[in-house]
Image (spheres, rainbow, N blue to C red):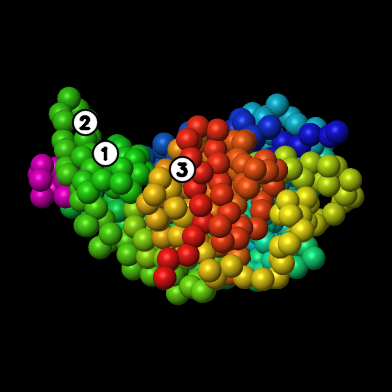
Amino acid sequence: MKSFTVVDLNDANIRVARDEQVLVRSPGYAVIKDDKIALGSQAARLTRLYPRSSHNDFWYRLGQEAIQSMSKQIRHNADLAYMQLAEINEQAGKPASCLFAVPASFNPEQLGLLLGLLKAANFQEVRLVDSALLASIKALHKGELQHLDMQLHQTVLTRLVTDDKHQVVATDISPEVGILNIHEQCAKLISDEFINQSRFDPHHNAETEQLLFEKVPACLRTLTSASMSKINIEYQAQSYSANITREAILRQITPLYEAVYKHIKHTTPLLLSHRFADLPGFSEGLNNACILDEFAIFAVAKDYTAYFSDIDPNTNYLSELPILNVAERPTSQVNINASTPDITHILIENIAHRLDGPCFYFSAVHQLETTLSTNSEYSIRLQNGHYFIQAENNAQIVVNETILKDTMLLSLGDKIKTSAAKTASILIKVR
């Protein structure tokens, strides 16, 4: 069977993976200096040093309109996109077949241009598929679902529906609310705190401004689970530090969050891309969301390898996919159209835990977790009135004495066992 190298084409960090192993990471940055062009991570480390020579919106504004450039090689954004694609192709070892997971924010003209750029960059055989669709399939059952992802300059909400197939039905874009904008707002706050706490202004020169921006992602990651993050900047044999509180960061970036929230249907289950796991407080403003694993796109692509191998390689862009291995319960008494409102809690070691959200993860000893991790063994998801269980990380899960082989509809009284737990967890109703 043909194997595909998968490219997650999100300019926040373009990722290339083969067999679920990431080979290349390349954010959408370019810096042109002395007629030399740096791309990806190398360019990201130079953007504040050479701001007039930097480009970070060539994927966001992909097109052939003329732009200001420091190089005769670069006439428009498509030239920069081509150069990054060519570099990625080399770094990935010039794969024979590639599947590009492309956001729905690309319009038809941009998709056509992308296909031309891929050909010019010597990608041999390519197929394009909607990235939200690919990432969400394991959570898609009958009904509607939303997927949210963030790029450097915008946030894309994709609405998906499953009936006799999985398909994209609508897209809603929040322009100018992207990772870069969030980082810039945080950098302003952090700079002010350095001035107040250390009498040091990181924005005073380009070198320290670059160091500041490189510290922002780790600071936000820390504040997802801590109330404070300490940032240190070393410059000219001097050390400066500032303590940044989660409360202050949330005050700074909550208006950006709210600009995204207003596009979300709060009564429809929502899947957040892994990028939101590093944004403190974002998911706390939502009661219908769970965060996808960062390898979700690559895992589903592997499941669909046979399908992608069979379709015409000239197919421009896939926004719908067939349902593979439709989940069935091991008994014949289940009505898939019936909702499961009687389930309110899961009983673990004589303690009832309320199922009051769209997605829950459990460890080998049934410990409840908020996000998918390497310790997760199974998940329970609420989809249009149905609770479904799914094994995670290739764990062996037993439901009602039957090994779980695929996503399965749950009913009141179902017993769930893992290999490590001494007792089963039970789905119950608490009045």
Left of 236 or right of it: where is 416? right
The image quarter in which residue 238 lies: top left
Residue 323's spot in the image, x, y percent?
78, 56
- For residue 340: magenta? no
On residue 366, the disc is 3
- The residues bearing labels 3 and 2 have C-alpha atoms spaced at a distance of 48 Å
The image quarter in which residue 259 lies: bottom left
- Residue type marked 2: Tyr
Highlighted magenta segment, given as a residue range = 193-204
Q: Identify which residue, 134 or 347, lies in the foreground.
A: 347
> What residue did someone put label 1 on?
208
Give the mark nearest the N terminus, 1 or 2: 1
23 vs 126: above or below? above
300 vs 4: above or below? below
Residue 283's spot in the image, x, y percent?
41, 59
Q: Residue at x 55, y 41 (%)?
A: 417
- Residue type marked 1: Thr
> What residue did someone put label 2 on?
235
Tell me if I can see residue 194 in this picture: yes
Give the mark nearest the N terminus, 1 or 3: 1
Instruction: Categorize mark 2 by other alpha carbons within 10 Å: few (<14), some (14-19), many (20+).
Output: few
Dot 1 falls on a residue whose secondary structure is: helix
Q: Residue at x 58, y 54 (%)?
A: 414
Does the CB distance between marks 1 and 2 fall below 8 Å?
yes
